[in-house]
């Protein structure tokens, strides 16, 4: 059978590249190496409209093996799946999709994301560097008391103590020990953050709650007293703005705390909570199977009763009221929201949040927590619409973390490239270039631990609590972290740094990844590397918004160009344990490694590079 050629990532076969705005004319070319194919049809299925269309591609007389045609994308946002139907000279027919020739019932289709581009994505987010802070563990400016606060809290006297990880007498891990990090402490450290090149602060929840992670919101309209006051928040936002830094808040809108003002299971608040009476103004927010003890909760955790995001009273409180939660904190200085567990929020609810944000502050950013490719995610049997224009501007880029760590720990660079090119193809360009790229967060092990560990993860929680990398593991881990940072800071999207990764913090899962920042005990050399990369990102337009083009991706070596109208930067990484030598094309004259200032003179348009084990360069 004739070889058929089609590559949706090549401009020879499809333009424009990747996702397209509504009503875009998309040009297709389909090529065969013989004249055995007489007719070619593009079959496109619009999933949300549940509609098939077919477009015939025609071959000119002077090039009978190349079929051309134009498909006009739908007028409304869509997820389009397409493949080709081929008519052969012998009268036979076949389908052609991702896996080549297949039968009608097994053909695999390519994805075309069609999005509404009428509402622009704020460009400040993707250009800069985001720094994530777990507020209780960053810096304590003022020592406060836990007396009289919601929950059974304890407060560590010493900042350097280990976080509590053992269950209590009832076998529960309560997350009720606090260190007292506060908003004023973050404000005091703004100069430090500025030295790292930070332009956005992403804060884990700051509202009143009974736990140190504060994902069990007790009062959406009150700063947790251990963190400070409303005035402290206003001051932080104002001072951050003066430093050129914006603040993004964590919106936990899928559930509240059982000990909240709204549920009030323990009767702490004087107001009538949903768990106390069906007459509570908040009763309709929750789904009780048997009042008051059996109710829907997040992943079955009784301390996190789930809310009904379609309930009018709840939606008004969070989104639509003049003093709604979303609007209130934007007015006080926040520049955006990160939506916790976005998969569990209805599309309609996310769209209402976005509409309120656009109305309240047009340059605000909405980021969703999604762990997979968010362009085609199915959650609770529904295809989601996060990136089609009316919901989130961008998503947390877990696929980037997964692919990058696999590569940095010995995987094939080709797999990293393939995974990232799939995202670039599927995501609208504004979403791809504003993706929140990260390598560790409060929900994952620390970067240094992942990259330094040479053996198996310790089996017991007790062992993981006391585990530290050996000197050799830490040395190798630091080298890999520097390489990881180079990849993170030069890749499209906003690099996101989890507090303390730059200082060499270690740790496995919660709470070991949430220890206090080691002020006075930092790895200063590592901090300097991150600061250098932050400065370089800020200096180079190509690193902020430049297009990406891969030059090499094979084995341990990854090389790509970031290109803007005025400049180009080349990132070359050797993640392997042995040195490598390679030659790469270079359009300019002398090339300088921005990290070491070493210079390279191209010969015949090629740069000849030698990279040591776990070494990288950033060529200007």
Image (tube, grey):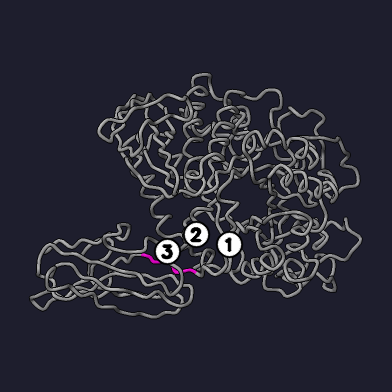
Q: Is residue 107 above or below residue 451?
A: below
Cβ atoms at labels 1 and 3 below 8 Å apart: no
Q: Nearer the viewer, residue 115 or 446?
A: 115
Q: Nearer the viewer, residue 230 or 102?
A: 230
Q: What is the crowding at mark 3: few (fewer than 14 residues within 10 Å), some, or many (at least 20)?
A: many
The answer to which of marks 1 and 3 sits earlier in the sequence is: 3
What residue does disc 3 label?
19
- On whether residue 22 falls in the magenta region, the answer is no
Residue 8: name its quadrant.
bottom left
Cβ atoms at labels 2 and 1 below 8 Å apart: yes
Q: Nearer the viewer, residue 369 or 297?
A: 369
Magenta-highlighted residues? 111-115
Measured from the top left, where is residue 431 in percent x and y?
51, 58
What residue does disc 1 label?
392
Secondary structure of the residue carrying tag 2 is loop
- On whether residue 114 falls in the magenta region, the answer is yes
Identity of the residue furthest to the top in this view: 471
Quadrant that contains the N terminus? bottom left
Along the horizontal axis of the image, is 211 left or right of 346? right
Mark 2–mark 1 Cα distance, whole angstroms, equals 10 Å
What residue does disc 2 label?
374
Q: Is residue 116 above or below residue 510?
A: below
Along the horizontal axis of the image, is 339 left or right of 469? right
Mark 1–mark 3 Cα distance, whole angstroms, equals 16 Å
């Amino acid at each position: 059978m004739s070889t058929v050629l089609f590559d949706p990532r090549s401009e020879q076969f499809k333009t424009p590249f990747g996702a397209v705005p509504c009503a875009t004319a998309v040009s297709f070319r389909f090529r065969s190496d013989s004249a055995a194919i007489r007719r070619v049809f593009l079959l496109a299925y619009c999933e949300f409209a549940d509609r098939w269309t077919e477009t015939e591609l025609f071959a000119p007389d002077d090039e009978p093996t190349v079929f051309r045609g134009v498909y006009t994308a739908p007028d409304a946002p869509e997820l389009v799946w397409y493949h080709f139907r081929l008519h052969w000279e012998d009268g036979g027919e076949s389908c052609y999709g991702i896996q080549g020739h297949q039968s009608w019932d097994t053909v695999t289709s390519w994805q075309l994301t069609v999005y509404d581009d009428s509402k622009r994505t704020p460009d400040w987010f993707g250009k800069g560097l985001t720094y994530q802070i777990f507020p209780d563990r960053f810096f304590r400016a003022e020592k406060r008391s836990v007396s009289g606060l919601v929950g059974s809290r304890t407060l560590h006297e010493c900042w350097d103590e280990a976080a509590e990880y053992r269950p209590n007498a009832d076998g529960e891990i309560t997350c009720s020990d606090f260190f007292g990090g506060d908003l004023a402490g973050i404000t005091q450290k703004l100069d430090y953050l500025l030295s790292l090149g930070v332009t956005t602060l992403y804060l884990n929840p700051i509202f009143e709650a009974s736990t140190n992670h504060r994902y069990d919101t007790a009062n959406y309209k009150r700063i947790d007293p251990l963190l400070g006051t409303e005035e402290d928040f206003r001051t932080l936002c104002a001072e951050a703005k003066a430093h050129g830094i914006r603040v993004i808040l964590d919106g936990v809108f899928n559930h509240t705390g059982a000990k909240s003002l709204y549920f009030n299971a323990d009767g702490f608040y004087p107001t009538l909570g949903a768990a106390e009476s069906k007459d509570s103004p908040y009763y309709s927010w929750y789904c009780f199977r048997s009042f008051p003890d059996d109710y829907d909760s997040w992943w079955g955790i009784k301390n996190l009763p789930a809310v009904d995001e379609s309930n009018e009273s709840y939606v008004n409180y969070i989104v639509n009221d003049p003093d709604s939660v979303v609007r209130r904190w934007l007015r006080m200085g926040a520049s955006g929201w990160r939506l916790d567990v976005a998969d569990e929020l209805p599309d309609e609810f996310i769209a209402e949040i976005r509409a309120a944000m656009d109305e309240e502050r047009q340059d605000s950013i909405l980021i969703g927590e999604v762990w997979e490719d968010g362009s085609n995610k199915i959650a609770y049997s529904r295809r989601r619409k996060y990136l089609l224009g009316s919901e989130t501007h961008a998503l947390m880029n877990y696929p980037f973390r997964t692919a990058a760590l696999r590569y940095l720990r010995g995987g094939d660079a080709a797999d990293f490239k393939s995974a990232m090119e799939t995202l670039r193809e599927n995501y609208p360009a504004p979403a791809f270039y504003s993706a929140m790229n990260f390598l560790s967060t409060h929900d994952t092990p620390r970067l240094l631990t992942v990259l330094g560990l040479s053996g198996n993860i310790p089996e017991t929680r007790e062992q993981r609590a006391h585990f530290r990398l050996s000197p050799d593991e830490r040395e190798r881990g630091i080298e890999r972290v520097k390489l990881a940072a180079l990849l993170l800071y030069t890749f499209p999207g906003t690099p996101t740094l989890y507090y303390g990764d730059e200082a060499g913090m270690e740790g496995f899962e919660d709470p070991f990844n949430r220890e206090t920042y080691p002020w006075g005990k930092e790895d200063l050399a590592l901090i300097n590397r991150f600061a250098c990369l932050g400065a370089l990102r800020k200096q180079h337009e190509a690193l902020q918004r430049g297009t990406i083009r891969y030059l090499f991706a094979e084995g341990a070596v990854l090389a790509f160009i970031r290109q803007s109208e005025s400049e180009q930067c080349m990132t070359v990484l050797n993640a392997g344990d042995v040195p490598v030598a390679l030659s790469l094309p270079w359009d300019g004259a002398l090339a300088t490694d921005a990290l070491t200032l070493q210079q390279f003179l191209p010969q015949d348009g090629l740069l000849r590079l030698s990279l040591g084990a776990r070494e990288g360069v950033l060529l200007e």
